[in-house]
Image (tube, grey):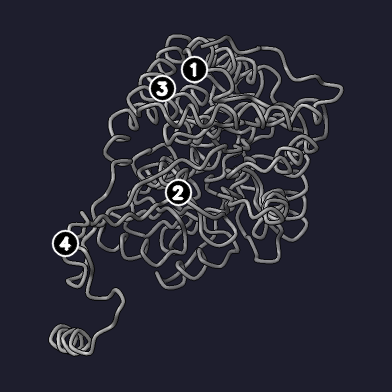
């Protein structure tokens, strides 16, 4: 065991350090994977204790680095991370245990089973919007599966990488098992060029495409968690007060900077006006976060703020009606007022692009079939929500939505359920993590057949005999005719 360095890599020449970091991880990988799972679990339990014992500092740094409210930092970043460790502490042994498989009659006397082997070194690229959860959950599962990890957090984060390093050291993980690599896109490219055994990337569609293209040159497998354009369908029989509160929270928590934010709300025509008024009341009651205990904080990046202004200006120019909120003036303050829009058309950019900010378009629909078609009319397929008091009806709608996840009578919280797989369809990504799939994602599958080898020869060995041929043919006809 040794102490991790807590300083950043050399800021002048960070790219030059990447190959050595990869070499260190590779040298450590064989030893780490040879440790019994019980030892890896014990170290992860220590890490959980270190994190849970220092929640105030984690929350403070999330507020400083990512402009979060106290509640968003605690419940959307820290809770899912701690719960993920707890889930895998309980379930990892069963998930990773060899899995017996049946064998056909012609293989009588043998046994078949599947084992999961670590990949080697995994590169995890994490974003800035949920920089603990979206970094550490894949790191946790990759480590438990027996891999070493190189974590590259977003370059927008100033303090969090050092805190992650310190927490790893305090938990007693061996040196080089999990290294934190800081830097911009050039460092990210160098990390892929160093040829990890897998890339796990969370971020935007455009950057994800670039990562996949780069990794494909070296045949490096990728899991990609990408952009979303999540739809919420509100049927006329829904609990409208609950649905309105859910739409406002799902659209505006973390200033809308969530891959599974509600970005389109489709409301059945009969209750459309009433629902819009309920949403307006909820939004007008929100408190601007100034001391950390309000509801809505500022956006995190100038680029995201400018993009929201662009989308809102385009929608207003094309006829959208602002129910509440406004187009803010440009300035150093990145607080963007939560804005609700109606009279939306498909030509508006707000309906075509991921918003990733506090804008909420609300549109009417007539029939369930129309709502399903509207929700599916997107290149993205990350998540969706359906609200109806008729759960059978809601489930039927959900099964027709082309999304990786779907929630009935709630929103967004799928992301924090570590027991279910998470990931998207279409342009929202490739692969799944969380649940058993989260551990499988960081392993290679090996199929093993075992024969005790008691007999000198087998019927299918040389030399071939006519009598054996006729017997096998007769047996096949008996079994398969």
Mark 3 surroundings within 10 Å by alpha-carbon count, few (fewer than 14), some (14 through 19), many (20 or more): many
On the image, the x and y values in percent for residue 47 come to 44, 17
Say which mark, if any, is on residue 444: 2
Q: Disc 1 versus disc 3: distance between alpha carbons?
A: 8 Å
Q: Is residue 355 above or below residue 16?
A: below
Whether residue 458 is visible to the viewer of this picture, yes or no, is yes
On the image, the x and y values in percent for residue 162 come to 64, 15
Q: Quadrant of residue 197?
A: top right
Left or right, residue 349 beside residue 74: right
Please give the residue where the numbered disc 3 appears in the rendered image: 44
Q: Quadrant of the C terminus?
A: bottom left
Q: Disc 1 versus disc 2: distance between alpha carbons?
A: 23 Å
Q: Residue at x 65, y 48 (%)?
A: 355
Please give the residue where the numbered disc 4 appears in the rendered image: 109
Q: Is residue 371 above or below residue 263?
A: below
Mark in front: 1 vs 3: 1
Of the image marks 1 and 4, the number of the one nearer the N terminus: 4
Q: Residue at x 47, y 22 (%)?
A: 74
Are the residues flagged by discs 1 and 2 in contact, CB closer than 8 Å? Answer: no
Q: Disc 4 versus disc 2: distance between alpha carbons?
A: 27 Å
Mark in front: 4 vs 2: 4
Taking the view exactly as shown, the residue that stands out farthest to the right is: 12
On the image, the x and y values in percent for residue 459 come to 22, 75
Mark 2 surroundings within 10 Å by alpha-carbon count, few (fewer than 14), some (14 through 19), many (20 or more): some
Are the residues flagged by discs 4 and 2 in contact, CB closer than 8 Å? Answer: no
Most foreground residue, 166 or 348 = 166
Q: Disc 2 versus disc 3: distance between alpha carbons?
A: 21 Å
Of the image marks 4 and 2, the number of the one nearer the N terminus: 4
Say which mark, if any, is on residue 173: 1
Q: Disc 1 on helix, strand or loop?
A: loop
Are the residues flagged by discs 1 and 3 in contact, CB closer than 8 Å? Answer: no
């Amino acid at each position: 065991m040794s102490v991790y360095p807590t300083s950043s890599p050399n800021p002048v020449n960070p790219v030059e350090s990447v190959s050595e970091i990869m070499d260190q991880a590779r040298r450590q990988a064989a030893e780490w994977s040879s440790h019994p799972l019980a030892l890896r679990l014990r170290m992860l339990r220590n890490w959980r204790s270190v994190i849970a014992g220092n929640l105030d500092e984690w929350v403070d740094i999330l507020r400083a680095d990512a402009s979060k409210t106290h509640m968003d930092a605690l419940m959307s970043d820290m809770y899912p991370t701690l719960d993920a460790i707890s889930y895998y502490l309980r379930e990892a042994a069963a998930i990773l245990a060899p899995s017996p498989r049946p064998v056909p009659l012609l293989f009588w006397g043998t046994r078949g089973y599947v084992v999961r082997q670590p990949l080697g070194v995994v590169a995890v690229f994490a974003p800035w919007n949920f920089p603990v959860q979206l970094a550490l959950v894949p790191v946790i599962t990759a480590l438990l599966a027996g891999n070493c990890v190189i974590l590259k957090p977003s370059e927008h984060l100033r303090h969090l990488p050092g805190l992650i390093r310190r927490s790893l050291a305090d938990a007693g993980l061996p040196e080089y098992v999990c290294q934190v690599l800081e830097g911009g896109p050039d460092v990210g490219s160098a990390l892929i060029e160093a040829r990890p055994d897998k890339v796990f990337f969370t971020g935007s569609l455009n950057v994800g495409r670039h990562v996949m293209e780069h990794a494909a040159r070296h045949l490096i497998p990728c899991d990609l968690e990408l952009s979303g354009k999540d739809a919420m369908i509100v049927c006329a029989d829904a609990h409208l007060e609950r649905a309105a509160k859910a739409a406002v929270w799902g659209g505006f928590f973390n200033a809308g900077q969530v891959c599974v934010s509600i970005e389109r709300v489709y409301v059945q025509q009969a209750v459309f006006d009433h629902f819009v008024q309920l949403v307006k009341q909820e939004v007008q009651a929100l408190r601007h976060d100034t001391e950390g205990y309000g509801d809505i904080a500022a956006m995190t990046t100038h680029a995201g703020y400018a993009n929201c202004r662009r989308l809102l200006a385009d929608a207003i120019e094309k006829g959208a009606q602002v129910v509440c909120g406004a187009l803010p003036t440009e300035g150093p303050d990145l607080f963007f007022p939560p804005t609700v829009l109606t009279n939306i058309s498909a030509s508006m950019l707000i309906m075509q692009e991921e918003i990733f900010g506090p804008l909420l378009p609300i549109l009417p629909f007539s029939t369930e079939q129309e709502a399903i078609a509207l929700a599916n009319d997107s290149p993205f397929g990350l998540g969706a929500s359906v609200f109806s008091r008729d759960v059978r009806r809601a489930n039927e709608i959900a099964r027709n939505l082309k999304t990786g996840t779907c929630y009935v009578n709630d929103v967004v919280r799928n992301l924090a359920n570590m027991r279910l797989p998470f990931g998207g369809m279409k342009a929202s990504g490739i692969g799944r993590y969380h649940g058993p799939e989260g551990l499988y994602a960081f392993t290679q599958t090996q199929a093993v057949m075992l024969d005790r080898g008691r007999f000198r020869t087998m019927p299918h060995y040389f030399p071939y005999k006519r009598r054996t041929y006729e017997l096998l043919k007769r047996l096949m006809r008996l079994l398969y005719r």
